[in-house]
Image (spheres, rainbow, N blue to C red):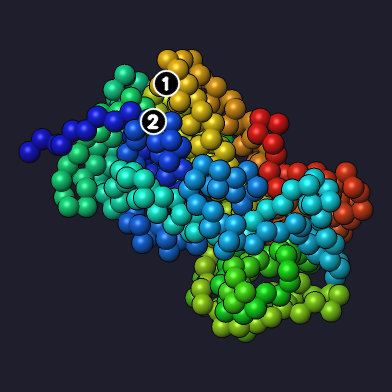
Amino acid sequence: MSPQTTSVTVGIVGAGPAGLMLSHLLQRSGIDAINIDTRTREEIENTHRAGILEHGSVRMLTDTGVSDRVLRDGYEHEGIELRFAGTGHRIDFADLVGESVWLYPQTDVFIDLADARGRDGGDVRFGVTDTSVADLTTATPKIRFTDSAGIEHELHCRYVVGADGSRSMCRQELPDEQRTFLRREYPFAWFGILTEAPPSAPELIYAHSEHGFALISQRTDALQRMYFQCDPETDAASWSDEQIWAELAKRTAGDGFELKQGPITEKTVLRFRSSVCEPMRFGNMFLAGDAAHTVPPTGAKGLNLAMMDVKVLHEVLERAVKGNEPGALDEYTPRALARVWKAQHFSYWMTSMLHRMPDASEFDVRRQIGELQSVVDSRAGRTYLAEAYTGWPEQG
Ligand code: DHB
């Protein structure tokens, strides 16, 4: 049986936050789009990711009519604490740059976007199999897949977007000689937990210690998210709750700080990697979000970068489709990558300043403390961190 063919202006591989935000924005511009994803909606909802939104990402959700739930269920944070040598130092975003961030988990961003696509009649196919793309350098690039009922489909698109995550199938379609894929590995990972406990602090704590990094984050008044640096080969299940609490306490000790403990309901080890694919385009296919670049989690830039990619991509696609200005598409890679590389640096800087390298000497640890002290003692240093953390102005 031949596949069922459908013509669509933009075919999007991926229905995570990046893919769904793009189809939402395109629909508002009167441009039709279809999302497909190999995962089911439930699978995506149950993937725990980072929890911090830049003010620009919050505005994309609220101002474009996705949802204002972030303003009701999220928590606005006007600063973070950097903890080192047993003392906490507040970075006051509101005072330094007049901005804030929002604690609002990526799963909730996804739920809001998926609900908005449903509400607005968006065409989103979850749980598909056998996805492939073809004819990317022609005027009719195609996406092929089998839907969850077993029916084969072929989408005839004007443009294809690969928003299919860090293991992107779409990215593999860029011929090796036409792309560079730059990568950096780190000799550690994060051990992440969810715990049913009250918050230990009103804001996030990024802690440096001779024992390694720890991050005290939150979810709600009754559920907290915490991480600590670990060996990438760590088997999360083999750690007892007592061992985890002892490790977190050691790394955040000082100032009379006390961690509020509760039952640990999730234990996972998170991969750590920086990567950038350049260019973010091949013919009439464009990559967005993790498909094009990944950052280490320190500083929570991943989702925010994906949102900004999509904002630029929507704008150039709109100019190409509605304004008959196909040259606008050439702006996508340079505009998106300018921000990506700033975020690569910020995530790398936060990581290298706060984590302990496996072969670190006493000198290395003391030098890091000197670096942290330079940041917190200087208004310029604190302002740099605050600008990057809350999100640079667009194209700035
Ligand atoms: C969270 C994750 C991060 O990587 C970060 O920098 C801050 C918060 C989180 O999951 O809450």
Residue 379 is situated, as x and y percent measured from the top left of the image, at: 90, 47
In the picture of the structure, the residue carrying the numbered disc 1 is: 322
Which quarter of the figure has residue 307?
A: top right
Residue at 34% x, 35% y: name it.
33
Residue 150 seen from this side: yes
Residue 184 is situated, as x and y percent measured from the top left of the image, at: 60, 44
Q: Is ligand 1 less than 8 Å from the beta carbon at label 2?
A: no
Is residue 98 rendered to the left or right of residue 198? right
Q: Are marks 2 and 1 in contact (CB under 8 Å)?
A: yes
Q: Amino acid at mark 2?
A: Gly
Residue at 69% x, 36% y: name it.
393
Residue at 21% x, 45% y: name it.
146
Q: Residue furthest right?
A: 377
In the picture of the structure, the residue carrying the numbered disc 2 is: 30
Is residue 225 rendered to the left or right of residue 96? left
Q: Tell me if residue 327 comes above or below residue 38 in the rendering.
A: above
Which quarter of the figure has residue 22?
A: top left
Residue 356 seen from this side: no
